Image (cartoon, coloured by chain):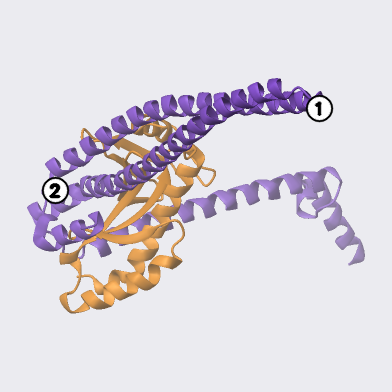
Amino acid sequence: MSILKSILTAIRGGASEVGEAVIDANAVRILEQEIRDAEDAIGKAKQSLTNLKASEIKLKRELNSVRNDISDYESKAIRALESNNETLAGEVAERIAEFEVDASEKDSEHQNLNMQVNKINSMIRQREKTIQKNRRELEKIKTVEQLQKATSSMSTNFAATNATEHRVSKALDRVKKKQAKWEDRMEAGEWMAEEGQGDELDKKLKAAGIGGASSSSGASVLERLKQKQAVQ
Amino acid sequence: MSLSELAFKLNDHVTDEGTSFDAVLSEEGVLEVVCSSNDEFPINVVRTETQLLAITPLFDVKEVQTDKLSELNEQLLFMSPAIPLSSIGREGSTYILFGSMALNTVFDNIVHELEVQAENTLEVLLVVEPLLV
């Protein structure tokens, strides 16, 4: 059964009660041990594979060397035939025949070794995939464990108090009030900043000799009254 | 980044929007993070071998009006894909909002995830509030 299915079955079976583990802790330990053992085995298999591959490479080199010798002696035999020295050509041919037997044996051995290397290599890859899959399964279990841990405080709280009446509504109200207060403060801050900018502007206008109210003074009022009197 | 290191950095951080954090690491290895923009629903951060999980417990199944449970579940299923960076689920009898991050997530992105999750929590709860007791 897949881990997810086991988890769901366990939850449906009531294993999600406070403090109760969804997956048996022993099962987790066994899975962890299995992963470690498989990794050790793969490490050893890789070491053997390295040795086997080294032998295969060595054999291949030897085989190539024998084939070169055959080729070399073949051309020597032809040269002997060309010089009508059939006796010497016959001796060379016998040497070539020995080399060919040797090459055939080495070739067969090399093919077997090559097959073994490929087989072990593919087994290792297969095992590595299984380990990765097991690791993912383990991660699912650990995630559920962590989830339980992260929500257990709330579950314990509910189990102990059972005080659920309008809890969310009340909490949301409190958040809304705090947010409104915060927005009010922001607005007030902006207003203050704008006011500050307004003062600055008035100062600049006054400095430039622009702005009615700011240029009012006792002398100017007296002047205005005198003008009024003159008109009357 | 370890959870204790994350706690240390969060407690010392204020975002451009003025959000600050109050992070406390429990003995059980749960980092409780309270966002100043939503201090009623803390985010619990835990760590596995491959990821950081940020979990906000929303409400218990007991808090749902008994005849509204199916409607609530349906609403949450519809809503979940539309919520940025967070998903909705249930752990035991507790409905949760959660997000996951790779262990190598940089601090700024963790902060962003936590801020968004705090906002998402309020949005989800505002939608389902009428179905709760």
Q: Chain of mark 2?
A: A
Q: Is residue A66 above or below residue B68?
A: above
* Chain A, chosen colour in render: purple
Residue position marked by numbered label 2 in the rendering: A21
Q: Is residue B108 above or below residue B12?
A: below
The quadrant of the rendering that contains the N terminus of chain A is bottom left
Q: Nearer the viewer, residue A144 or A154?
A: A144
Percent of width and height locating residue A67 = 62, 29
**Res. A117 image quadrant:** top left
Q: Is residue A63 visible?
A: no
The amino acid type of the residue labelled 2 equals Ala
Instruction: Confirm whether circles 2 and 1 share one chain.
Output: yes
Residue position marked by numbered label 1 in the rendering: A82
Name the N-terminal-most of marks 2 and 1: 2
Percent of width and height locating residue B25 = 28, 34
Percent of width and height locating residue B118 = 39, 53
Q: Is residue A57 visible?
A: yes
Q: Is residue A60 above or below residue A201?
A: above
Q: Nearer the viewer, residue A9 or B61?
A: A9
Instruction: Please name the residue shown 24% across and 57% down the image.
Output: A2
